[in-house]
Image (cartoon, rainbow, N blue to C red):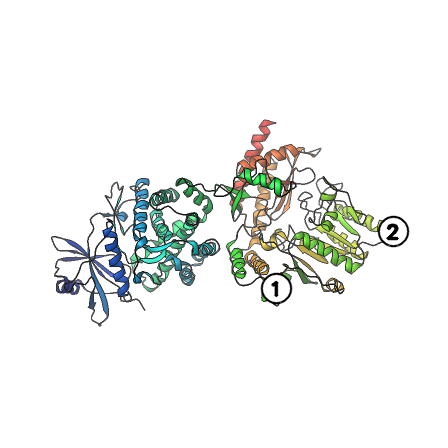
Amino acid sequence: MNSVKPTFTMDTLLTYLKQHYQLAGELTPLASYSDQNFLLNTGQQRYVIKVANGADKKVELEMQNSAMAHLTAKGLPVPQAQKNEDGYYITEIHDEDDNTFYLRVLTYLTGDFYAQASCEAVGPELWENLGQFMATVTSALADFQHPGAYRYFDWDLAHGFSICQQKKQFLNKKQEKIVTDCLMNYQAQTMPILAKLPRSVIHNDANDHNLLVDNITNPKNICGLIDFGDMVFSHSINELAVTAAYAMMGQAEPIETLKSVVVGFYQEYPLNNDEFDVLLSLILLRLCSSVCNAALAMKKEPDNDYLAVSVAPAWQLLSYFKQQHIFAITCQLKAACHVNPDSGKSKKDIKTFRETHLGKTLSLSFKEPLKIVRGKGTYLYDELGTPYLDMVNNVCHVGHCHPKVVAAGQAQMAKLNTNTRFLHDNLVTYAEKLLATMPEPLSVCMFVNSGSEANELAFRLAKNYTGSEELLTVEGAYHGNTNACINASPYKFDGPGGEGAKKYVHQVMLPDPYRGKFSGNSLISAQAYAEDVQRVITELGAQDKKPGMFICESLQGVAGQIIMPVGYLQSVYSMIRDAGGVCIADEVQVGFGRVGSHMWAFETQNVVPDIVTLGKPIGNGHPMAAVITTQAIADAFVTGMEYFNTFGGNPVSCAIGQAVLEVIQEEKLMDNAFETGKYLQQELEKLQQVYEVIGDIRGLGLFIGVELVVDRTSKEPATEFTEQLIECLKAQQIILSTEGKFHNILKIKPPMVFNKADADIFIKALKYGFELLIKQL
């Protein structure tokens, strides 16, 4: 039913009041959203006169009257509806066009409006009392039921997501982006929990124009609640979300306000863990609802100033919380209510179980391991909500728990997940989009579950195509944890517990411009390193053998964050192909735009591999991987033996993979990697001018290595110093780790949403660490 705002003159209303209530006096207009409100002063008493919008249903007005009577009976200060001359609480009246409206007369509550108190006048005592008061209202309504409460309502947060989706189009682009981000997080984090939340009838509009305080100069207590027009049967926690959203508006320290309100509410209405977890998300949804509903309303009524009352402070809060750690705030709220933020096992118990039942080779980072329970963007959070800037997690490529990726997985998981023996759009749609990022002739895609599986499959493809199992690999390289991958990884077979290279495995020099035999990033050094590959090819030829495959990370990761001399892969690929082998580019760590300038790191070397292996970032933490190759190599794999992978290419994985590709494009993460990476390297180079311990800085995009040395001339690795620095950074809430043969290289591979503000935080912490540790030397 369309909204019809009443437009009765005061004289007309006075006539109705005299006729139906035997009341007379002076009417004063009150602010209203979609109805008409007046203050009636009879000389002896005051009343609030309410004329409902023509779209309001009588049953809903009856519900409001019943709820007020219900609360009054429980001793709460709320208005009460007055009977008319016929004994009814609602009077039907008509305007000049014969439209029907409903008139009510309510008792007037004494007190000052919360809105009349200045921001400086209100404080923790009032906020805590506000929380207690609204919790008492929530508890009092827990046993209240009425048919009019079960309605669809634009201001019901249970429908807030869909309402905002419909109305955000009326915002400008910048505003719409803020709202969209909030909605995506709500969809991913809160929607799955909603079914478990308690429900009841709630007031749903405890704003500062509906609350009365004991005085406006030094308010300490809430002394009344008015306007029950937004009442609805919804999630009980929404009462607190709405109350807190309004209380924080205009406050210099919104989180302190929030803590006080929540502490007060919790004293009277203890929240369960799920309610704590969704509270911030619901508050943000309420703010989004305010700005979206107002945007549409202002479009319809541009001269109605009342519509904009809450919009400016709502935008301020949305912008404020965009910069905050929401999970950390949730933990603070729990702590303020004396609730343990961590309801799980202790770190000691987890560590003991791991060591006993999960195998002693399962390693942990840091001397005192972290218990990480949540992730968002570039941050990880421990069990107490402490935020840690993640500088190394290249798996969660587009940011931890990116809401679009999470939602894509949730949506498909709820529909279907099965193997590839059935036809499904997701498999071919994702494969088509992934292949579109590859150069010709890479046109065949095979899905697996991990980078290790991808490399293992690549070896099988290469062997079938070339007829040779001879494998060339680079010193220090790591390609996975299967038998075949371990055999291709000098980092493993030449490391602790390793058994050395198999007869078919041949190591070539690591093309390291800083520490290697041939220094500098030049065509000369590139060719010099390439000649070592020719050496192996020649040796194989002398044995009547040929290379079957050459595998090389497009940027060397585990070997030390190495950027190979430009021209190296061009020369090597030509040598390998001339000898009958194929070239495998391992992009498991470095692909999907991390280098900034290109989608794939091999492109920085101006080559096109025969086989490309993908993993880690492909699913943003979801276990999936892929092998991309040519039609000729794929055809050679057709030997009569079926290749089948139960989970490879399943609908859920493909939905997630597609979402990752879309986020990379939509959020321009390649551009961000390029610009932020360049900025970070420049800031690191400034530190290098001050601290002699920094021997070398290298990188492309958000793949950066910082090599620390005892002496720049001898290049003696500063292994112990680096280890201490990692612990020092952890104490400053920065997660970083080391790489390279001597574990003296800081490996910087953060999620692609890592920005310049994050870089500044890291540089500040790094500088502090250098200063502290150098003093101790």
Query: Which residue lies at the image location 77% right of the left edge and 43% below the top edge?
Result: 500
Q: Which-is-in-front pick, marks 2 and 1?
A: 1
Which amino acid type is marked by label 1?
Leu
Place of residue 183 in the rendered image (x, y in percent of width and height, measured from the top left)? 45, 56
> Up-down: is 707 above or below 437?
above
Quadrant position of the C terminus in the picture:
top right
Place of residue 132 in the rendered image (x, y in percent of width and height, measured from the top left)? 31, 45
| CA neighbours of label 1 inside 10 A, class few (<14), some (14 to 19), many (20+) | many
Q: Which residue is mark 2?
A: 543
Place of residue 18 in the rendered image (x, y in percent of width and height, measured from the top left)? 12, 63
Please name whichever residue, 33 or 158, is drawn nearer the observer in this view of the structure. Answer: 158
Q: Secondary structure at mark 1?
A: helix
Is residue 461 visible in the rendered image? The answer is yes
Is residue 608 visible in the rendered image? The answer is no
Q: Which mark is residue 427?
A: 1
Quadrant position of the N terminus in the picture:
bottom left
Q: Secondary structure at mark 2?
A: loop
What is the count of numbered marks? 2
- Asked if residue 397 lies left or right of residue 89, the reply is right
- Asked if residue 124 lies left or right of residue 563, the reply is left
- Mark sitting earlier along the chain (2/1): 1
Please name whichever residue, 543 or 320, is drawn nearer the observer in this view of the structure. Answer: 543
- Asked if residue 695 lies left or right of residue 194, the reply is right
